[in-house]
Image (cartoon, helix red, strand yellow):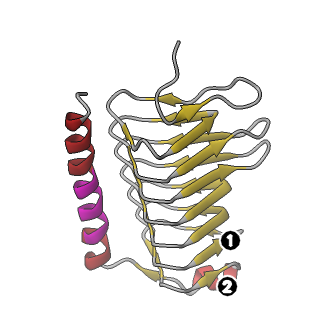
Amino acid sequence: MALRAGTREDTSGRRPRVAGSSFLDPTASVIGNVVIGDEVFVGPGAVIRADEPGSTIVISDRCNVQDRVIIHALEGTTVTVGPETSLAHGCIVHGPCEIGAGCFVGFGSVVFKASLGDGTVVGHLAVVEGVEIGAGRRVGSGCVIDSPKAVRQLGVCGEEETEFAGKVVAMNLLLLRGYRDMAGG
């Protein structure tokens, strides 16, 4: 079976599995044991790499992985991204990592060895490392959240953040469908 454009097998021969309804920009790279669900938008320059032994990346339905996002899983670890989650321009999600449904990770942010509950919003240029954040919490732009104490101090997402995250998903679904139609799919 031929590989889809923008994808390649890893050194062990593991191949990405990408739903036909998803759109991968021609400049994106998807390598190794990666599963991409339905209606996922993968933008220009994004790198999704599960090529270390025992690593896995699963991106659920209707997510968007925007320009220059990097998702990587270390040996023996998994990165999961829940449905309708947005990974904004230039962010890094590094496994082991679990991101829940309906989350937003802002421009240039880093999420490493962490778990984000459903509906969590991470602002721009923030760092979330080595912690578990419950559902519906807000990490402010520029914050470093790397301890249980820092997690306890997080606020709850307001209506504005929740609406914004929903609009980003809706816009990227619109773009996905437009680009997919342009490509004849």
Give 2 or 100, whichever is nearer the viewer.
2
Is 167 a magenta residue? Answer: yes
- The residue at 59%/53% (across/down) is 71
Quick check: 75 left or right of 8? right
Residue named by callout 1: 129
Which of the two discs, 2 and 1, labels the residue nearer the N terminus?
1
Q: Which mark is residue 59?
A: none
Give the magenta range: 164-172
Q: Mark 2: which secondary structure? A: helix
Asked if the residue under mark 1 is in contact with the one under mark 2, i.e. CB atoms within 8 Å, the reply is no
Q: Is residue 75 above or below residue 171?
A: above
Residue named by callout 2: 149
Give 42 or 101, whichever is nearer the viewer.
42
Label 1 crowd bin: few (<14), some (14–19), many (20+), radius 10 Å: some
- Which image quadrant for residue 131? bottom right
- The residue at 36%/51% (across/down) is 84
Residue 115 locus on image (x, y percent): 60, 61
Cα distance, mark 2 to mark 1?
Answer: 13 Å
The residue under label 1 is which amino acid type? Glu
Quick check: 61 left or right of 173? right
Residue 112 locus on image (x, y percent): 67, 64
- The residue at 40%/63% (across/down) is 119
Residue 105 locus on image (x, y percent): 47, 67
